[in-house]
Amino acid sequence: MRVALFGGTGFVGGYLVDALLAAGHEPSLLVRGGSDGKVRQAGGCRVTTGAVGTGESVESTLDGCQAVIYNIGILRENRAKGVTFEALQFDGAVRVADCASRSGIRRFLLMSANGVHSPGTAYQETKFRAECHILESDFDATVFRPSVIFGDPRGHMEFATQLNRDMVAPPLPAVAFHNGIMRSGGDVVMSPVHVEDVALAFVRALNDPGTIGRTYALGGPEVLTWRQILERIMAATSRRKVILPMPIPVMKAAAALLDWLPAFPVTRDQLTMLAEGNTADPGDLRSLIGREPTPMNAVTLSYLSRNAPGAFQRDTN
C-alpha cells in the first residue's frame, strides 16, 4: 500500500517510515526544501518537496495513495517563521484531509496527543479540533493519543534526551515538578511510551477495520512520577543528582517572564499540561501491537549514554 506520510522527517516520523517499509508499504513523504537528507531509507520512499501550506504539494504527495498518516506537530511556536499550532496542527490537517477526500482516499490516521481537550491550551485546542474534523469527515479514521514518547532520537528532539540535557547533565540540582505550593496537588505523572511501539501501532491499524472510528490512548506499561523519570535517566547515564521539589505555580511565574526566550526549557502552556497529568492505560497499545509495551528503564534509555546531551535538532515533525 502506498501511504502518504505528513511529518515523516522528524523523531516519530523516521520510525513511522521504518515501520511502514518493514510492513511492505511505500511511504510517500512531503518534505520541506533542504530537508531531503533527513528522510530515512529514502530509496524506499517517494519524496515530494514542498510545504503543507501549499495545496499543490499536498496533492502531489497524495497521488496514488490508499491511506494518509498526518503526524505534523510542534511543541513550541515560532510565530516569526509562521510555525504555529494553528497553521501546522489544525490548518495543515484540514488541508490534507480536504485534498485526500477529493482524491477519494478513505483511510486516515491522525497523530494527536494524550489529554487534548477544548477549552485548553493552544496546543491542546488545535490537536482536538483536528481530531473532530477528521472523525466527523467521511473517512475511515483512527486517532492516536500517545503519552510522552521516548526512544533513541537519532538526531532529533526527544523527551528523555531533553530532560538529560536540561536537568540531569548540568552540574546544578534537578527539579521534580509537583502541583500546588506544598505538593498539595500531588506529583506530576506520565505513562512514557516507546517510539517503536507507537510506530507499530500505526502500521498495525492501517489494515485493521476494527480500529476505524476509534481513538486510542497510547501509554507505556507504567505510570511514573517526574522524579521517577529523572531517576531512571540518571541510572541510564550513571549520574547522581540532587532532586529538588519544584511547585508548578512557581515555575509558571518564571515562565510568564522568560518563556519567550528559546532557551527557557518550558512554556506556560506546557506547565499547564504537566499539571493535568499525562497517563494512559496500556491496554489499547497492548491490543494494537500484540505484546507488552516497552518499559522506560536503564536498558531502553541506554541511548542517552551514547548521545551527547545537546546532539539533537528541533523540527516540526
Image (cartoon, rainbow, N blue to C red):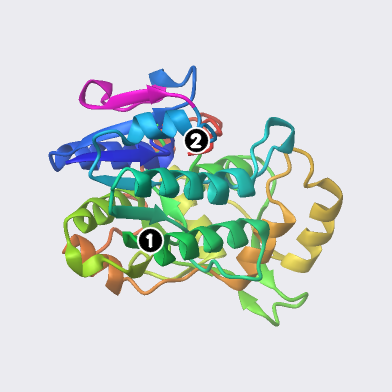
Q: Residue at x 50, y 42 (%)?
A: 161
**71 relative position to 4: left or right:** right
User: The residue under label 2 is which amino acid type?
Assistant: Val
Provide the secondary structure element on which disc 1 rests: strand
Mark 2 to mark 1: distance in Å?
20 Å
Q: Residue at x 23, y 51 (%)?
A: 203
Q: Position of residue 311 (x, y in %)?
A: 51, 29
**Residue 301 appears in view:** no
**Between marks 2 and 1 in the image, the one whose residue lies nearer the viewer:** 2
Task: Locate the N terminus and report the quarter of the image it occupies.
Answer: top left
**Residue 78 appears in view:** yes
Residue farthest along the bottom direction in this orientation: 184
Q: Residue 144: give its label.
A: 1
Task: Specify whether residue 40 is painted magenta.
Answer: yes
Task: Specify whether residue 75 is painted magenta.
Answer: no
Which residue carries the number 2 mark? Answer: 52
Q: Is residue 74 above or below residue 307?
A: below
Residue 66 location, quadrant = top left
Residue interval drawn in magenta: 38-50
Q: Position of residue 18 (x, y in %)?
A: 25, 37
User: The residue under label 1 is which amino acid type?
Assistant: Phe
